[in-house]
Image: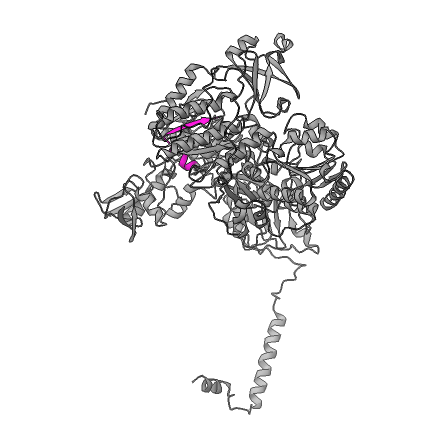
Amino acid sequence: MLKLTIDNQPVAVPAGTKVIAAAEKLGIMIPRFCYHPALGSVGACRVCAVSVLKGPRTGIQMSCMLDVEDGMVVATGDPAAVAFRRQVIEWLMANHPHDCPVCDEGGHCLLQDLTVSGGHGRRRFPGKKRTHRDQQLGPLIQHEMNRCIQCYRCVRFYREFAGYPDLGVTGIAARVYFGRFREGTLESPFAGNLIDICPTGVFTDKPSRYKGRRWDFQRSPSICIHCSLGCHTTVSARYREIVRIEARFSPTVNGHFICDRGRYGFAYANAPERPRQGRIDGETQPVSTALDAALERLTTVSRTHGPDAVACIGSARSSLETLGALKRLCERRSWRGPFLWPDAQTARAVQTAAACLAPELRLSMKELEDADFILVVGADPVNEAPMLALALRQAQRQGATIAVCDPRPVALPFAFEHLALAPPFLADAIRIFARAAAGPPQAGVRASGGDAHPPDPNMPPAVQARLAAMGATARTCRRPVIVCGTQIVNSRTVARAADTARMLKSADKPAGLFFVLPGANAFAAALLSDENGAFNTLQAGIADGHVKAVLAVESDLPAAGEGLAPALKSLDLLVVCDYLNTAAARAADILVPTRSVFEEGGIFINQTGCAQRAAPVHVGGTPVAQTGGGDHPPRTFERSIPGAEALSAVQALDRLAGTETADPPAALADLHPVLAPFASRKWPDEGQLLDLSSEAAPSADWPPEEPPAAGKTFELVVRERTFGSEALSQRADCLRPLEKAPRILVHSDDAARLGIAAGDRVALTCAGGVIEGTADVRNTVAAGVVIVDRHRELNWPAAGAGWVRIEAKQIHKIEKERER
Amino acid sequence: MPSENRKNRTKPAQSSEVSLAETLKAFGCGFATTAKHLLRKPITEQYPEEKRQLPPRSRARIVLTRDPEGDERCVACYLCSAVCPVSCISMQSAQREDGRRYAVWFRINFGRCIYCGLCEEACPTSAIQLTPDFENCRRDILTLVFEKQDLLVDHGGKDREYNFYRHAGIATDGAGKGAHFDEDQPVDPTTNLP
């Protein structure tokens, strides 16, 4: 530790710290534009000048470029430094346009703050201002290059940090220009962060353009619920409308950034079609009437056909409180459920993952960035959990080797090795890797893997050799990490991944394990429900006539699995509680609107088992823009807020259960032993880590999986996309242009065998119906796999749940389309 | 000694006897003053029959003015609503088709306004101005809530010249990049020539 003095205050920091960071530790914010903790120093803006009074070189120095030295004395308020900074601001403002009143950054603009605090008010430079032409950068980001102060934060984030090449810097001297080579939509799904890091208004938020000023917003710390990572966000609302979501710093989860799905996926909360009132048999009714009717009819079904005739459904997008209330309702009324999983395989995989996350193995995203070898199995980071790709990119920048075993054509913003393997091979792939990583067998050291099946003869030898080579590399690495998905793999793969991480860990290395789960609260769903809570169980119940009524809470049933939609028609009663206008909500006999996470808040457990709380942002109600019909708000004054009738799902479920929960978080303590900390309402800011690993992990002994016969049968994999797949964000209009056209993908060899070319229309005849779409042929798809994009334009629910195998004869080319 | 001071102050002057001459003099002066004012031109104005021209900078009813080209000056920057000490101004900004930022709606609750003039002081475009028209009483308090159409006037108020969009530097249909005051033509970032 080096000791130095800044503004007469002593501070001790490790060697290599910059003076600007040391000052921050003391609470002294030295002005800065180009310096950013995540991006480092570049020394471009010259506004962080300080006076070094004692040190190797005294005088005015740039504090972001200056490493601390022992005994250094620094003065930030020295008149010479202040005058220097004032002049820098004046230079930076020489070309800055006179447009703060019409700039969306005004009010939270770093340049504005420093200009005002530095006292610069009148432009003395008599010359004309340099101007730039702007570019259209897509639906999310507004470009206004005149405002640029050349801090290089944008390209440093976009190219270096995120690893995308399509935004760069051109020109020299005063003509330096930050933009794309040609106008066009930014390719990166992290482009929205440019808005946060730009210290002035060059990049501003386009969907919320001219919606208001920062000072008028209701702002609250929240948690992103568009994937399982649980990134920290700050939500802004104004006039009962969610206006903007920004990244909130979290040292362990997302750092300073979030992805565009999390930033722009909130439109569902403002949607005009969002249910605001209750509905009974197609007639609009007050919420409490709808709830009373729901209770009455559900009780009638329960009384006539027995409590087993009522089933309760939830989903992983609900808060922990809601899932807990659903569980309590099922217990109190002896109704079936809660059913929280699309299929039993996912339920088992997620439960295995939750049980395998021992505290010593679990890694946060920040720790993942420190890894030097990462094996990703059955996960497609950019599409399933975008911020994971950014964390992997940071590891790769620091020299990590990254390999991905996945059947999908995984694309990541950096160089990595992709082994395209069909899902049944993934468990064996991990075993081959683990064998090599364990090294030659030694006495007393247990070989990893847990079972004695020989390597799969169907796996190409070249792939086996690569896996063995990777294992050998991992053995020499300081911190090898296994990242495992749960959407397309089974619990066997998950358990093997955990075994391998444990084996690597025991070799005296800080190895770790990182899971990607399906849904924001999948971990919580794993706490409160098991594989019996999968929809196929329910579907069988409906089919044989045992289940007469379904209560669906924040769950879109027809999108959830094959065959459930027709099954719902045979129900006597469908009650839906939701804040989305889903197909289930439209089909419901009784609809009870609920409050979204922005109005109610809630606890969400991310994939590391960290329970984090989102605070409510506003009270809810129909946005003023809608009540006013685009013009001024109505000139009538009422005590109640229009459209704010909805209850929280917890209150609604409590009414159905006939109980009242005064404190929903505290009530969770009874549901599961690991939720006991919620009883004492103390809530740490960094979240509460839950540990399920003491529970017995499921048995690791499985029969070998039957691999697909080459060219005859195909594994059907439903692929999630960054935009357009996730239930909430697919309702955002601004993200529609970014959705990639949905495709049915096959490997080029398989395509040749099937006689399919890219661009052909193909039809897959599945158990649940026909999936019709445009084919795409790639070499990066695993052989023996057909991939269907999870997109509303494709009938992907027909694929069914879990691992689905289809035969070659079930894949047809639609000839007519081609002739056209 | 405060108590003694008070005692001294409260003591009346010991001259209970007023002479007759002094009394008559006082009466005379009083009547003379009255007579003088009886014959003078009255200074009281007969409001509301007679209305006086107030100075142009006196502060009363607020208006939204237009620029010399007749377009709305207000860019809905929210500075007036931010500075308003009684929060009587509200608005919603949006982008107009020609690229200008404008107020979709703009509302001032004159039932709450204290006519302090801070909004006018904060306005960067000279849009919001206070006028001398103080006769703004209503029987129904709701009619004191003025919408944009009630506030807009068809002149520039006290500032006849200023046109923010000629200075602003953002491209609109009226003026593209480089067409504003003190601006050079847009540069070509692809050339390396000095």
Q: Is residue A183 visible?
A: no
Q: Nearer the viewer, residue A395 or A333?
A: A333
Image: A814 above or below A597: above
Instruction: Give the left or right position of residue A587, taking residue A97 as reference.
Output: right
Q: Residue furthest left?
A: A56
Q: Is residue A539 visible?
A: yes
Q: Residue A412, located in which quarter of the rendered image?
A: top left
Instruction: Give the left or right position of residue A240, taking residue A781 as reference.
Output: right
Residue B185 image position (x, y, % from top left): 42, 28
Residue A151 image position (x, y, % from top left): 37, 35
Residue A162 inside the magenta-drawn segment: no
Residue A624 image position (x, y, % from top left): 63, 43
Q: Residue A16, located in which quarter of the rendered image?
A: top left
Q: Quadrant of the C terminus of chain A?
A: top right
Residue A791 image position (x, y, % from top left): 59, 25
User: Residues in magenta?
Assistant: A365-377
